[in-house]
Image (cartoon, rainbow, N blue to C red):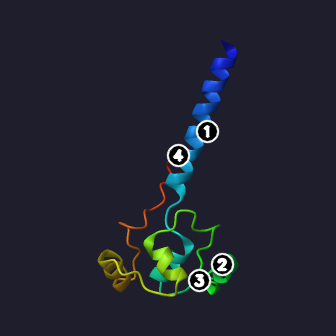
Amino acid sequence: MKVTKSFTGLAFALALMVGASGVLAGQSCCVKAKAKGKECDHECCVKAHKEHKICEKCQKDASCCDKAIAQGKECTHKCCEEATKEHKVCEKCNKKEDKKEK
């Protein structure tokens, strides 16, 4: 009986951790920099972008904008184009971090 309760508790804790990591992914450093009219200066991102790749450390859940930035292009989604014109991050494609979730 104790083993079953322990296993259930462990499974529940793991599910919470996995769920929270997806919620906390949020907007990448590269997307935030792009909205400010700059390029990300993280060494890992600069190196990845030189190879036209996404930084595995900073863009675990890469958005359309992250993928375009890595290729040295502009995102072609209309919502992203409009946000870029206003020096903002497209919140439809780049969800804000929810820091309340843990």
* Distance Cα–Cα, label 4 vs label 2: 27 Å
Nearer-N-terminus badge (4/2):
4
- Circle 2 crowding by C-alpha within 10 Å: few under 14, some 14–19, many from 20: few
- Circle 4 crowding by C-alpha within 10 Å: few under 14, some 14–19, many from 20: few
Q: Please say if the residues under marks 4 and 2 sit with CB atoms less than 8 Å apart.
A: no
Q: Amino acid at mark 3?
A: His
- From the image, tell me which residue sits under label 2: 42
Query: Going 62% across and 73% down the picture, which residue do you hit?
Result: 55
Q: Secondary structure at mark 3?
A: loop
Q: Amino acid at mark 1?
A: Leu
As drawn, the label of residue 52 is: 3
Q: Secondary structure at mark 4?
A: helix
- Is 39 on the left-hand or right-hand side of 96? right
- From the image, tell me which residue sits under label 1: 14
* Distance Cα–Cα, label 1 vs label 3: 34 Å
- From the image, tell me which residue sits under label 4: 19
Q: Amino acid at mark 2?
A: His
Residue 25, position in %: x, y? 53, 59
Residue 102 in view (yes/no):
no
Query: Going 69% across and 18% down the picture, which residue do you hit?
Result: 3
* Distance Cα–Cα, label 1 vs label 4: 9 Å
Nearer-N-terminus badge (1/3):
1
Nearer-N-terminus badge (2/3):
2
- Circle 1 crowding by C-alpha within 10 Å: few under 14, some 14–19, many from 20: few
